[in-house]
């Protein structure tokens, strides 16, 4: 079945440093969504990427979708303590998986002030 | 706010019992998905409901069943509870296209003792 791998599993950074998490799939994806879950909270939708090679920015966050649509990344510039949480990629794959999201294990980000 | 509402927020059940969790989707959303999230893991897809029918199902046993009502609200039922069913159960809703992502509820924390 559809699987995604996110790396790293954990990332500890000093406030102001940059952070990147990567999401890799074994199969081609129709699109991919990213979510953030704060400690003790629930996932919150950040963005959806659809096109090959697509790049989208939200303030300090930059999202990329690979040319082959098998991987994606989220980069945060100059992290802040408010960025703390777990970031999940959630692809919606081809072949009957349309509609439901498949979450990776996520990357847990901690930011030291 | 017209977000996703889940009840109850916390629940303690005994092994072998049955439980029903409830979800009201965000206003304007007609598709409801249920996820199970164990501690430190990503949400695992249970099933999705649309037009009162189960449309897709993840790798969960028949002990997990659901229902969607004409007003789009949904229930998740789990029979013959096992200790391993202890988790956060998340309900997520989306509109027809899903391009604006899923809106998650705050979840029901189920503890089986």
Image: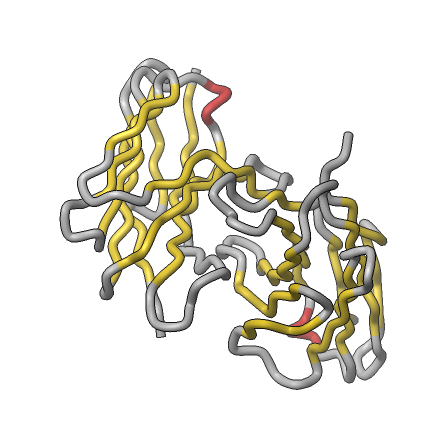
Q: Which image quarter is the N terminus of chain A in?
A: bottom left
Residue A106 pos. (x, y %): 41, 48
Image height of B109 relative to B69, above or below = above
User: Where does the image place residue A25, in percent across and percent down from the top left?
Assistant: 26, 59
The answer to which of B31 and A26 lies nearer the viewer is B31
**Of B65 and B113, the residue lying toward us:** B65
- Give whichever of B5, A107 is nearer the camera: B5
The quadrant of the image that shows the C terminus of chain A is: top left
Q: Residue at x 70, y 42 (%)?
A: B28
Of B16 and A25, the residue lying toward us: A25
Residue B78: name its quadrant. bottom right
- Residue at 68 percent across and 73 percent down: it is B53
- Residue B46's place in the image compared with B10, above or below, is below
- Name the residue at the left extreme: A67
- Give how far across and how far down residue B72 sits, in percent: 76, 57
Residue B110 appears left or right of A12: right
Residue A87 image offset from top left, x and y in percent: 43, 40
């Amino acid at each position: 079945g559809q699987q995604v791998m996110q790396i790293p599993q954990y990332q500890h950074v000093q406030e102001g440093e940059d952070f990147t998490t990567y999401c890799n799939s074994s199969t081609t994806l129709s699109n991919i969504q990213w979510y953030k879950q704060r400690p003790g909270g629930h996932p919150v939708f950040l963005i959806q990427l659809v096109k090959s090679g697509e790049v989208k920015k939200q303030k300090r966050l930059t999202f990329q979708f690979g040319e082959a649509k098998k991987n994606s990344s989220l980069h945060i510039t100059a992290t802040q303590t408010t960025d703390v949480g777990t970031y999940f990629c959630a692809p919606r794959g081809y072949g009957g998986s349309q509609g439901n999201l498949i979450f990776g294990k996520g990357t847990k980000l901690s930011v030291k002030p | 706010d017209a977000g996703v509402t889940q009840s109850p927020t916390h629940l303690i059940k005994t092994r072998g019992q049955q439980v029903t969790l409830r979800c009201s989707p965000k206003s304007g959303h007609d598709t409801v998905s249920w996820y199970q999230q164990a501690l430190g893991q990503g949400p695992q897809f249970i099933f999705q409901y649309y037009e009162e029918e189960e449309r897709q199902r993840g790798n969960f046993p028949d002990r997990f069943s659901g229902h969607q009502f004409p007003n789009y609200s949904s229930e998740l039922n789990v029979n013959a509870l096992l200790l391993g069913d202890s988790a956060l159960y998340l309900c997520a809703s989306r509109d027809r296209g899903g391009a604006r992502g899923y809106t998650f509820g705050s979840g029901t924390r189920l503890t089986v003792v």
